[in-house]
Image: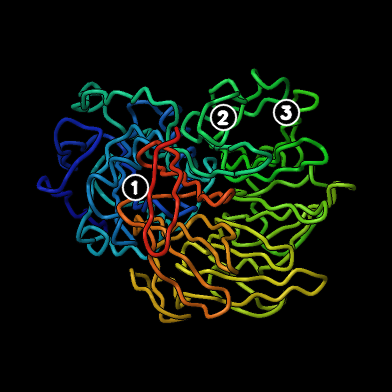
């Protein structure tokens, strides 16, 4: 029996289109609905795939994003609009604020894709990441049935939103090292170097998204994230997340080169290894350097990897690839979108975003992971100070080692900075009213904050239980 799709309500907020769309009015065209949520790495992986399909099929295919939030902070139309701008989404998006469409279409995972043929019937529903060639196998025969009359009807395009002319655009991560601040200017696809007062000294990358090695001004990155500084080599290692690579910015030679990754997204989940430049990676999000070993948070496959810089050898360090929060050794340990890393030289500290938890991994030949705060459940989040598993965070992304055996946490979706005592495991709020802070850097008694959705870097000074902040960039 052929099934008609539930209609898309006109009274929900619609983005990137001047007026709500009706599936009835789109009859004669092929429609692809994508259920997504902004913090999900799998949904982010689908964004360039959908763009490829839009470029390939033109007006023969109508893609409509249905934003069905996982986290509370993702639900508002304003938050979705920011995500649409941040990721450069151009197709219409409807904000499914109460998950009614999610339930009506029986979606069970992010992303979920629903294919509707020109006659207006659902012909296929797929969950999870899918490569473009697989989706084209579904779409090609449907496209043949698109009617000429329907193709002549244009969608009511929304007015173009102006791009803010700010020095930074959605800065994601920040590193304080060598009397400098290194800022991942993610929205501009480049690295900004500033002094500790915020005076910009240098920009690395030409500002266009791409994968291009060469001199500092002409090199290209794509949505760079975390960084690590190698003082001995005067080199900055960059998690070039959009290119699925690790890049090296060699300031001594004034050159950028690719250290690991092929430029393609790695699909293998099981632990493995090999020569760094031959292995495809999957969304490297943050880096730390310990004794010429580069540790990499691979958010896309929920693992921590390690690269031996002397040999170029790259391998899974810990994490089975299953998405979850499982403590223990390499045989069982699991993460869920590890996004932030820092180290005290003895352990790695991990912001495990999708479980809203902070984890610790012992360094050595037989690493073991333990959860320091948060419940570790995929759908258990909130905003609650406390001790250990009584703490509730909401999608933390950045962390930084703090004074007195503590850890700073960018509690991203709660718009707060929190401090975790590594002795007592007590977690408490110390700064609020931020705008989705992501990266943190610590130095000279200050905490440097990439306040992502205000396009700023802040310097925060703490005195007792109070904080004072000023805008650096």
Residue drawn 59% across and 49% down?
Answer: 443
Q: Which residue is mark 3?
A: 256
In whole angstroms, how far apart are the C-alphas of marks 2 and 3?
A: 12 Å
Residue 30 left/right relative to 277: left
**Where residue 23 is drawn, which disc sits there?**
none
Q: Is residue 367 above or below residue 251?
A: below
**Where residue 190 is drawn, which disc sits there?**
2
Which of discs 1 and 3 lies nearer the camera? The answer is 1
**x%, y% of residue 452?**
41, 42
Q: Say few, some or many: other residues with alpha carbon within 10 Å of mark 3 (under 14 / 14 to 19 / 20 or more).
A: many
Q: Secondary structure at mark 3?
A: strand
Q: Secondary structure at mark 1?
A: loop
- Residue at the left extreme of this rendering: 11
Say how many tags the image has.
Answer: 3
In whole angstroms, how far apart are the C-alphas of marks 1 and 3?
A: 31 Å
Q: In which quadrant of the rendered view does residue 321 lie?
A: bottom right
Q: In which quadrant of the rendered view does residue 85 lie?
A: top left
Q: Which residue is mark 1?
A: 435
Residue drawn 75% across and 25% down?
Answer: 255
In whole angstroms, how far apart are the C-alphas of marks 1 and 2?
A: 21 Å
Residue 196 left/right relative to 105: right
Q: Which of the two discs, 1 and 2, labels the residue nearer the N terminus?
A: 2
Decide which of 333, 200 is in the foreground and name it.
200
Residue drawn 29% across and 23% down?
Answer: 162
């Amino acid at each position: 029996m052929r099934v008609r799709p539930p209609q898309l309500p006109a009274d929900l907020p619609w983005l990137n289109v001047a007026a709500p769309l009706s599936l009835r009015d789109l009859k004669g065209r092929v429609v692809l609905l994508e259920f997504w949520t902004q913090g999900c790495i799998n949904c982010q992986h689908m964004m360039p795939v959908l763009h490829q399909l839009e470029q390939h099929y033109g007006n023969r295919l109508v893609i409509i994003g249905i934003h069905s939030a996982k986290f509370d902070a993702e639900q508002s139309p304003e938050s979705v609009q920011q995500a649409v701008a941040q990721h450069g989404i151009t197709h219409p998006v409807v904000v499914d604020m109460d998950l009614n469409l999610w339930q009506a279409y029986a979606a069970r995972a992010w992303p979920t894709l629903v294919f509707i043929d020109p006659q207006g019937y659902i012909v296929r529903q797929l969950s999870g990441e899918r490569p473009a060639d697989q989706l084209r196998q579904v779409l090609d025969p449907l496209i043949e049935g698109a009617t000429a009359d329907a193709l002549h009807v244009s969608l009511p395009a929304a007015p173009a939103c102006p791009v803010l002319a700010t020095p930074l655009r959605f800065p994601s991560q920040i590193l304080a090292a060598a009397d400098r601040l290194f800022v991942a200017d993610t929205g501009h696809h480049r690295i900004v170097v500033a002094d500790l007062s915020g005076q910009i000294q240098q920009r690395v990358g030409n500002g266009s998204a791409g994968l291009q090695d060469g001199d500092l001004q002409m090199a290209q990155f794509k949505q760079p994230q975390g960084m690590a500084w190698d003082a001995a080599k005067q080199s900055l290692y960059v998690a070039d997340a959009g290119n699925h690579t690790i890049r090296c910015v060699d300031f001594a030679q004034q050159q950028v080169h690719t250290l690991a990754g092929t430029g393609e997204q790695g699909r293998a989940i099981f632990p493995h290894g090999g020569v760094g430049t031959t292995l495809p990676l999957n969304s490297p999000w943050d880096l730390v350097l310990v004794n010429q070993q580069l540790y990499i948070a691979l958010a896309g496959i929920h693992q921590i990897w390690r690269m031996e810089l002397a040999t170029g050898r790259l391998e899974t360090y810990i994490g089975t690839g299953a998405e979850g929060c499982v403590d223990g050794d390499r045989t069982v340990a699991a993460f869920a979108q590890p996004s932030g890393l820092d180290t005290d030289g003895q352990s790695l500290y991990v912001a495990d975003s999708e479980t809203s938890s902070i984890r610790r991994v012992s360094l050595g030949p037989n690493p073991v992971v333990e959860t320091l705060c948060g419940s570790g459940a995929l759908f258990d989040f909130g905003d609650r100070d406390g001790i250990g598993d009584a703490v509730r965070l909401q999608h933390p992304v950045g962390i930084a080692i703090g004074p007195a055996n503590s850890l700073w946490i960018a509690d991203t979706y709660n718009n707060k900075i929190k401090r975790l005592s590594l002795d007592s495991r007590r977690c408490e709020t110390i700064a609020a009213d931020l705008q989705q802070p992501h990266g943190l850097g610590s130095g000279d008694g200050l905490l440097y904050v990439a306040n992502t959705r205000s396009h700023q870097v802040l310097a925060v000074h703490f005195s007792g239980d109070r904080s004072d902040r000023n805008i650096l960039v």
